[in-house]
Amino acid sequence: MKKHYLLTASIIISFFIISGCKNDTTSNPTSGVASCEGCHTNYTNLKAVFSPDTTAGGSSCGGETPHYEPFDRVFLGGDGWTEFKNSKHYTIGCVGCHNGVGNTDDKKKAHSGEFVAHPSQKLADIKCKSCHEKEVTSHSNSIHQMGWGQKRKVCVRYGLKDATEFEQLPKSVKDGYEVNCAQCHASSCGDCHVNRPKAQGGGLMNGHKFQAKPDMINTCVGCHTSRGGHAYMGVASGTLPDVHLTKAKFTCTNCHSKDEVHGTGKFVEQRYKYEKLPKCIDCHAGLETKNAYHANHYNTFSCNTCHSQSYNNCGSCHIHGEGARLASYQGFKIGINPIPDAKPGFKYALLRHTLMAPDSWTLYGIPQLSNFNAFPVYNYATPHNILRWTTRTQVEAGKKCSDNCHIVKEGNIYRNKQLYMFESDFKFDWEKTSSMSVVVDGKLPESWLK
């Protein structure tokens, strides 16, 4: 499934991560190693006492997870370390957040006493909440923290009610989820504000410096590689960067506020049901009368059906095994809105192919997901590759405004038909049985196909 454009995105992201980390990998001559700081600022000592990884890093939508040596992931140095030492977080002390035992050169003893490597993953209510009560309370039940959206699909397709029943899954499936899905679908405070994302190798991103505003490239795109950063930066062949990047110079947080990212503390089963989700009309008022396109289709087509470019679709499976039977690909399909409850007002929406197949969890003891057809294989899509003028919104002089988007019969050829999701587009029977609700067969204007 590692297409060239995914690898290119991974290379770009890795470059920014490495070049942005100005660690001075020399030992600190002013300190011994009989303390947390003394050990973790002494690169030579870290290399001498580190414990090798026992499991592979796994993979994500962006390809194989980059590998950083254990001693590189925990080294304290560079400009980020200097800034951290001058911050309020530094005054708390290592043991104050991580527990363990200080003032010892015995690694085993230092990491005893209920030591925790990632405090915000398990102890946020104790360690972070005393200063950041609102953020911790809100985030504790969010999609970012809990991965509810992905857990929902796994649970329901297995035969459970919803994501809240995740712990009822067999242990083998939960273990498989942690190795595969949880590489991206779950993040704690530290994953956004201190560390590299797990999907990009994990470890300290910049000498333990706390970043109030997550870095777009090293943090946001580090997880949201395949369809987020990949699309926004125009990585794929034949695509351009999103106009919000080139014209407005927006980073992720210009649209996605901390209130949205942190959540509200309420259980939300999928991201399109977030109360704080940004909408195009937040910035672009009066769209319904802006031009002839909008006047005719404002309540029919989602904005992305006209203003998105071709974008990355998942393969049919990337659960550990021999790889995907259907590789990821650049594509564009308009179908019936699969989530009218969460995204009302549109009959048609842009769709993207998702990764799951009925036998995706075979290696984890589930030959076939009993309730696989609970969801279509194609999801509602909002690609971050927006342009004002696309192959559908820009037509040749003298042509009708619908020339590049309506299906037009020319002799025995139906031009523009490839834009829409038809039953004949399915490659496997299991796609058809789960996804007939999103196809446009018999639902388009009759005049288009005459």
Image: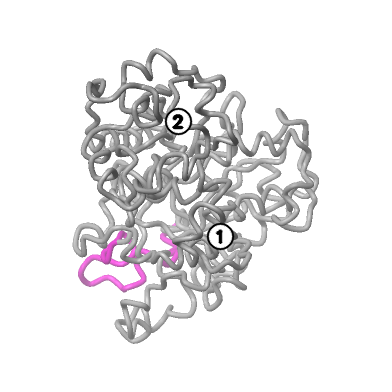
Instruction: Answer whether residue 59 is magenta in the image.
Output: no
Task: Tell me if residue 191 comes above or below residue 41 in the rendering.
Answer: below
Q: Image point 41% across, 49% down: which residue?
A: 192
Q: Is residue 230 visible?
A: no
Asked whether, in this view, residue 180 is left or right of residue 281, the answer is: right
Query: How far across and how far down the image is residue 366, in percent?
Result: 77, 35
Q: Image point 39% across, 30% down: which residue?
A: 74
Disc 1: CA contacts within 10 A as few (<14), some (14-19) or many (>=20): many
Calculate the distance from the C-alpha at mark 2 to the C-alpha at mark 1. 24 Å
Residue kind at label 1, given as amino acid type? Ser
**What number is the disc on residue 153?**
none
Task: Tell me if residue 394 comes above or below residue 378 in the rendering.
Answer: below
Q: Which residues are magenta?
A: 387-411
SS at mark 1?
A: loop
Asked whether, in this view, residue 115 is left or right of residue 23, the answer is: right
SS at mark 2?
A: loop
Q: Image point 27% across, 38% down: which residue?
A: 81
Residue kind at label 2, given as amino acid type? Thr
Q: Is residue 398 visible?
A: yes
**What number is the disc on residue 142?**
1
Query: How far across and how far down the image is residue 201, in percent?
Result: 42, 32
Asked whether, in this view, residue 131 is left or right of residue 162, the answer is: left
Location of residue 386 by image quarter:
bottom left
**What number is the disc on residue 65?**
2
Mark 2 vs mark 1: which is more N-terminal?
A: 2
Query: How far across and how far down the image is residue 394, in percent?
Result: 27, 66
Chief SS of the magenta region? loop
Task: Tell me if residue 100 comes above or below residue 290 in the rendering.
Answer: above
Q: Nearer the viewer, mark 2 or mark 1?
A: 1
Please tell me how many numbered marks the rendered image carries.
2
Asked whether, in this view, residue 156 is left or right of residue 303, the answer is: right
Determine whether label 2 and label 1 are within 8 Å by CB.
no
